[in-house]
Structures are given as structure tokens and as C-alpha cells.
Image: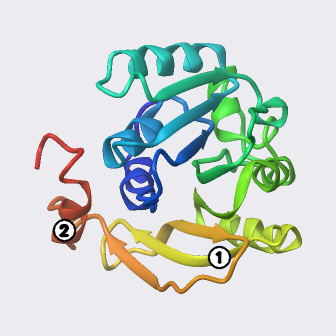
Amino acid sequence: MKVCTDACLLGAYADVANQQAAPRLLDIGTGTGLLALMAAQRNPTARIDAVEIDTDAARQATENAEASPFSDRITIWHTPVQQFNTAPASYDRILTNPPFYTNHLRSPDAAVNRALHTDDLPFGDLLTAVDRLLHRQGQWWVLLPPYEMDQLTQQAVRFGLTPFQRLQVQHHANKPFFRHITGFSFTSQPGTDSTLAIYETDGRTYTATFRSLLQDFYLIF
């Protein structure tokens, strides 16, 4: 799957700066390995596992991780997260850019369907995995459209996971929000909601806030 702007925003915005030595991070549905690589760049001591169900995507993520300066800290696992298990199974941070389409038209490409539709990873399975794998003092960061984020949040409460921080993303100030990045935890944490416009109202010029957030990752800045 191609790298998209909103996934880059998740990788740049999510709190991966756990202060303990060698924190453990998990990227569920890593695709190209983007979030795992961004987390490794942002946290120089983190040990990162990245799970991917699709064979070709897992192969590409492995190639990308091995070609990076962080190859000794990233491990790609070709497996459904429902079957993923490590010892100890406790992560300080989990990052997820999950599939979210449920009743939309399908692509003739099976890999595209797997990446975009919830058949292989419904929210119930995702929450069960996070409940099993996230440290009770850890954080789970998720990227979804607003409606799907509301649906996920309602289900998350049943697992004891509550949102503590949210970034609402819009193309520009005159457009509606099209993505939410939300941090969940098992414990009550202080946090605030904020907004981010990718472009100025001309639809072409990146905003200063977007440039500041992505400047360590975008070569054009």
C-alpha cells in the first residue's frame, strides 16, 4: 500500500517518547513498515515489533526495515495479530492505522481489500488484541475517520480503554474533519483535543503546524 499523509501524521503525532530504557512498541498492520520506522527514528532506544497479515506487505516491510538505520531494533512478524504472541506480551505503546470499511464496494485486488476493509481485523478482534498486548500503564494510538473512531471508542469502553487525547485533522480550515488520531489508555490521563489543517485555504500550501510536525520526515521541508 502506498504511504499516505494521514498515516505520516499518526507516526509523527503519537506519543512514542516513553522515558524508560528500551520501551517496547507494537505496530499492528504495519504495511510498508512506515509507523515502525517513524517510531524508531523518534525513539532511539525503542524495541519495535510490527505485525502484518499480507505476505507481500510483510516482505516489503522487512526489506524497508533491513535497509534502514534501525534494522537492529525492528522485527517484522508475518501473522494475524489475533495469533500474535510474544513473551512478555506487554507493550508500552501500540500504534494502529486499521482497516475501517465495512459495507463499501470491493476492489478486484485482494491486498487492497485486506488493507481497507475490516473483514480480517474487525474492531472487536483489534480491541481484544490490544487488551491482551498493551501494558496497563501504556498507550494505544489509533487513526480512523470520525464516524469509525466514534464506533471504536464506544466498543473500547467495554475493555476499560478510554480516550485521553485527540487530534482532529482536516484538509484545510474550510473543510470538515476527515481523520481523528486518538490516544487510548487503561488509566485516566490528562490530555486535550486539538485540530490540525494540512493546507492553507488555497489547498496547496502546507500550514506551519503541519510543516513543523512533519519536518523530520518530509524531505521537501
Residue 149: quarter of image = bottom right
Q: Is residue 120 left or right of residue 13?
A: right
- Residue under pointer 1: 163
Residue type, numbered disc 2: Thr
Q: Position of residue 168 (x, y in %)?
A: 46, 74
Identify which residue, 65 or 3, lies in the foreground: 65
Secondary structure type for disc 2: loop
Residue 153: quarter of image = bottom right
Neighbor class of circle 1 (other Cα within 10 Å; few <14, some 14-19, many 20+) is many
Secondary structure type for disc 1: strand
Closer to the eye: label 1 or 2: 1
Measuring 51% from the left and 84% from the top, which residue is drawn there?
191
Identify which residue, 151 or 204, lies in the foreground: 151
Q: Which mark is residue 207?
A: 2
Label 1 and label 2: CA atoms lie apart by 27 Å
Measuring 83% from the left and 36% from the top, which residue is drawn there?
82
Q: Position of residue 217 (x, y in %)?
A: 24, 44
- Earlier residue among tags 1 and 2: 1
Residue lying at the far left of the rendered structure: 221
